[in-house]
Image (tube, grey):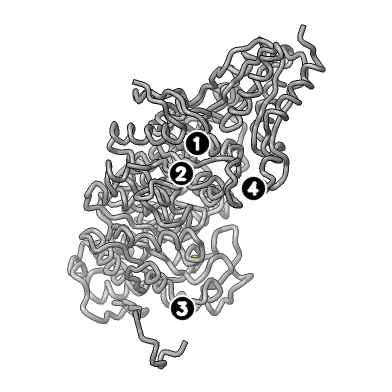
């Protein structure tokens, strides 16, 4: 039976469900035990599964990542929480030099089936260093999977998949969507694929591609376009690495127009990777240049200016209009 | 701080102990540990030391003749590797840095694999036999592997397994945050971990006196609430004894501890380094007087456990073993080019298949070795 859940509740449900199903799953991180995590993603886990499997760690992010690596080499399935994406940088060394490589370095003898979860992006008026978007940082690392869910049902199914995956997964949760809306989620233990984009909404005139929190604004933009008689197909990338270009190319082959929306800074972002792939493999189906909507190449501003940085519906619609100016709807 | 002030009292104090059985002249002092009664054990330890030194020499020769990539020699530190190899049990896990070859040999890593690794072949980390199969591959980024021991130790504790993880690093690594995060947290869960720091006096060109203001590494254990001690890392009897004590303490629920093995890096940092740029010949010459092999051989002979005949035989055998490893390494065929994709993921993602096909179709492209 499906229950209406916010995204953070769906994360909590997935953790509970998988910890029940698989005794090797452990969760670890700062304040995740009695406190239930700063966003309450792990609330109730300590009481249900005990302190051995719900591990409150010292305040040391390198340690959290390294500990997850150590646990995963022993056949456990650690799910580590980093409180805010800006605090993930100390984990980068562990992830890029060890977690992503151990399988390759040992020719398959050892591996790291682990997940690092973190809220990603801004929009909740948080303090400095709490609002960064790190998906591109991780998506460039070979040997990794990078997932950015956009709604409660996908968060549930993708997190199950991430935990079950035999390789390390970075799971970036859309901070400002944690409690933004609810959606029916069934605790059916069904994982979603970790290599597939989702068609969030079908359409025929333009393809809007996004992931994570920006999916919300992208859906709103598609709503606004629908009122103008423009039919937008919305693709939720969901898994950034490995990237499923087939779904995006198929959509663009149908619509001939594409705008990619990301929150992270523009240069070298994952939107650029998608645009480059469209240029290589989809140019002949395009009626107009592929345009990007993104954060700026600035430091993520503090709370008062964060809305200047984070793309919104207005900025998305502005780029969409440019596309239709270049290639009016036939 | 004024410790005589009436409002100030002592809340903790620490002492650091140092263990040595064999002085640098091979003279025994103190009551020797039980294993020193076991002639076969003593001989096996000596044989491993000599074989490791012969291997080390061969590896450097291979590099100097363009047949091996950069190599990190363990010259002068063999007693530490031998001690780890003999102190750990088969079920334990060893997380090495990169100068503990003797321990790896003892746990089943073929000498050829170490050459493969430094020769630029990942198969040199796919230990396929013995206890080494559960060990970590050697770790080049300094100290980053140390906190991983926390996860391994936690897994043992969670499953109530009587297993221990030994993680080794050098003095340079003790300056890194990774090291401190591990040392600071191990006692929180009373994990079965032994931190072994081989303090060889140098981190490439930086002497230990400039690595930290602390006079010892051992004292850093106290900051984490666990025991820390020093041992003469060039005394194989003492190092094995101290490690066994730390390992059994960990195994029996006594928790983590740190052992600082005081040694000396007789070789350059690696074959790509020239230590004459930053340290004097006198210092190195003086360090040779503390050579772990020399003193152990003197004591082994004096105690009737070793003879000149044994020595001749072993030297020949050790040279031949190293030579055979070198030949096995040199004869190992390169991996297929597309093997760079083989262990990237458990299953190669669809979007990388074309890259693998491109590499396979192009075929071998030679190497820069
Ligand atoms: Mg050193």
Element under disc 1: loop
Which numbered tag is attached to residue B215? 3
Q: Name the foreground residue: B321 vs B194.
A: B194
Residue displayed at 66% across by 46% down: A300
Q: Are marks 4 and 2 in contact (CB under 8 Å)?
A: no
- Kindly report the distance in space between the C-alpha atoms of the residues bearing marks 3 and 1: 50 Å
* N-terminal-most mark, 1 or 4: 1
Q: Which chain letter matches label 1?
A: A
In the rendered image, is residue A270 in sight? yes
- Kindly report the distance in space between the C-alpha atoms of the residues bearing marks 1 and 4: 18 Å
Which numbered tag is attached to residue A178? 1
Q: Quadrant of residue A5?
A: top left
Q: Are marks 3 and 4 on the same chain?
A: no
* N-terminal-most mark, 2 or 1: 2
Residue A286 image position (x, y, % from top left): 74, 14
Q: Quadrant of residue A311?
A: top right
Q: Which chain letter matches label 2?
A: A
Residue displayed at 46% across by 69% down: B200
- Kindly report the distance in space between the C-alpha atoms of the residues bearing marks 2 and 3: 44 Å
- Kindly report the distance in space between the C-alpha atoms of the residues bearing marks 4 and 2: 18 Å
Q: Are marks 3 and 4 in contact (CB under 8 Å)?
A: no
Residue B222 image position (x, y, % from top left): 37, 72
Residue A163 image position (x, y, % from top left): 40, 34
The residue pinned by badge 4 equals: A303
Q: Which chain letter matches label 4?
A: A
């Amino acid at each position: 039976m499906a229950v209406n859940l916010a995204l953070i509740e769906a994360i909590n449900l997935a953790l509970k469900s998988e910890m029940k199903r698989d005794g090797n799953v452990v969760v670890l991180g700062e304040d995740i035990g009695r406190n239930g995590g700063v966003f309450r993603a792990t609330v109730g886990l300590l009481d249900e599964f005990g302190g051995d499997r719900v591990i409150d760690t010292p305040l040391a992010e390198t340690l959290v990542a390294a500990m997850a690596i150590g646990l995963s080499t022993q056949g456990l399935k650690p799910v580590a929480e980093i409180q805010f994406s800006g605090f993930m940088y100390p984990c980068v060394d562990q992830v890029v030099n060890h977690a992503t490589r151990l399988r390759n370095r040992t020719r398959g003898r050892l591996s790291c089936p682990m997940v690092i979860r973190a809220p990603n992006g801004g929009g909740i008026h948080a303090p400095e260093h709490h609002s960064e978007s790190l998906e591109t940082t991780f998506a460039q690392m070979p040997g990794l999977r990078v997932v950015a869910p956009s709604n409660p049902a996908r968060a549930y199914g993708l997190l199950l998949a991430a935990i079950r995956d035999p390789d390390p997964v970075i799971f970036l949760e859309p901070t400002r969507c944690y409690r933004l809306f609810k959606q029916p989620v069934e605790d059916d233990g069904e994982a979603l694929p970790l290599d597939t984009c989702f068609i969030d909404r079908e359409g025929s005139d333009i393809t809007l591609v996004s992931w994570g929190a920006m999916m919300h604004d992208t859906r709103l933009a598609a709503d606004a376009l629908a009122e103008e008689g423009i039919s937008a197909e919305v693709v939720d990338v969901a898994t950034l690495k490995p990237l499923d270009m087939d779904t995006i190319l198929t959509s663009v082959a149908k619509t001939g127009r594409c705008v990619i929306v990301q929150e992270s800074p523009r240069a070298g972002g994952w939107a650029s990777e998608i645009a480059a792939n469209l240029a290589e493999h989809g140019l002949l189906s395009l009626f107009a240049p592929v345009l990007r909507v993104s954060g700026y190449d600035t430091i993520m501003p503090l709370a008062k200016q964060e809305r200047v940085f984070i793309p919104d519906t207005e900025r998305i619609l502005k780029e969409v209009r440019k596309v239709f100016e270049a290639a009016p709807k036939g | 701080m004024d410790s005589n002030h009436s409002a100030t009292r002592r809340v903790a104090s620490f002492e650091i102990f140092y263990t040595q059985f064999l002085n640098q002249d091979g003279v025994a002092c103190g009551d020797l540990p039980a294993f020193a009664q076991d002639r076969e054990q003593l001989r096996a330890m000596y044989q491993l030391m000599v074989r490791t030194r012969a291997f080390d020499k061969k590896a450097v020769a291979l590099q100097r003749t363009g047949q091996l990539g950069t190599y990190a020699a363990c010259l002068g530190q063999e007693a530490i590797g031998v001690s780890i190899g003999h102190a750990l049990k088969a079920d334990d896990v060893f997380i090495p840095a990169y100068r503990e070859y003797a321990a790896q040999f003892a746990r089943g890593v073929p000498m050829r694999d170490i050459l493969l690794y430094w020769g630029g072949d990942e198969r040199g980390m796919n230990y396929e036999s013995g206890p080494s199969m559960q060990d970590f591959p050697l770790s080049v980024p300094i100290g980053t592997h140390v906190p991983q021991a926390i996860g391994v130790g936690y897994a043992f504790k969670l499953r109530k397994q009587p297993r221990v993880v030994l993680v080794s690093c050098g003095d340079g690594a003790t300056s890194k945050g990774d090291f401190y995060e591990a040392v600071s947290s191990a006692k929180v869960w009373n994990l079965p971990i032994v931190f072994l720091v081989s303090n060889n006096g140098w981190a490439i060109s930086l002497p230990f006196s400039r690595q930290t203001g602390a006079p010892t590494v051992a004292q850093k254990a106290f900051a984490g609430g666990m025991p820390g001690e020093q041992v003469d890392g060039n005394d194989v009897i003492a190092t094995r004894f101290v490690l066994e004590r730390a390992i059994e303490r960990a195994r029996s629920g006594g928790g983590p501890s740190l052992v600082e093995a005081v040694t000396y890096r007789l070789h350059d940092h690696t074959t790509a380094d020239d230590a004459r740029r930053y340290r004097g010949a006198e210092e190195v010459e003086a360090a040779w007087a503390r050579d772990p092999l020399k003193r152990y051989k003197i004591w082994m002979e004096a105690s009737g456990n070793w003879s000149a005949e044994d020595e001749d035989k072993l030297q020949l055998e050790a040279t031949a073993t190293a030579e055979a490893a070198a030949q096995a390494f040199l004869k190992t065929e390169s991996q297929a080019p597309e093997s760079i994709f083989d262990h990237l993921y458990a299953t190669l993602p669809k979007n990388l298949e074309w890259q693998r096909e491109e590499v396979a179709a192009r075929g071998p492209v030679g190497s820069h070795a």
